[in-house]
Amino acid sequence: MNLKGTLPTLILQTLSSPEPKHGYRIAQEIKAKSKGVLDFREGTLYPALHGLENRGLLESFEAPENGRVRRYYRLTEDGRKELAKERKEWKKLATGVRLVLEGA
């Protein structure tokens, strides 16, 4: 199944909770919530995070955790607006796909 283009929306959704998260945690939450179906690697995840940050949808900061410095991400207000828009579009698309598949 081709999931190209869904990762940014999944990242935004994962960061919609109040606490900021580092990249590994974001990937683990996506994997856990999808029951292992979605397993994005660093080579895919970090470019998507940087792209979202460059678009002003995320902001990041560094903080120590267990003796090492990690980069944490959180949504900006623009990121929250984008997530709301993406969720609405995804629901519309999913409805259309379901209608076609169930009509087969």
Image: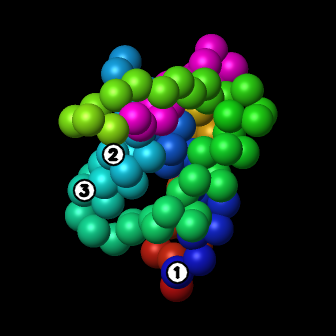
Front residue of 12 and 40:
40
**Disc 1 or disc 3, which is closer to the eye?**
3
Is residue 77 at least partly visible in the picture? yes
Query: Which amino acid, mark 3?
Result: Ala
| Residue 67 highlighted magenta (yes or no) | no
Residue at x 63%, y 52% (from the top left corner)? 48
Residue at x 73%, y 26% (from the top left corner)? 56
Q: Residues within 10 Å of mark 3 (few under 14, many from 20)?
A: few
Query: Which amino acid, mark 1?
Result: Met
Specify start and end residues of the magenta stretch as a single range: 69-80
Q: Element at badge 1?
A: loop
- Name the residue that disc number 2 marks: 25
- Name the residue that disc number 1 marks: 1
Badge number at residue 68? none
Residue at x 52%, y 24% (from the top left corner)? 61
Q: Quadrant of residue 16?
A: top left
- Name the residue that disc number 3 marks: 32
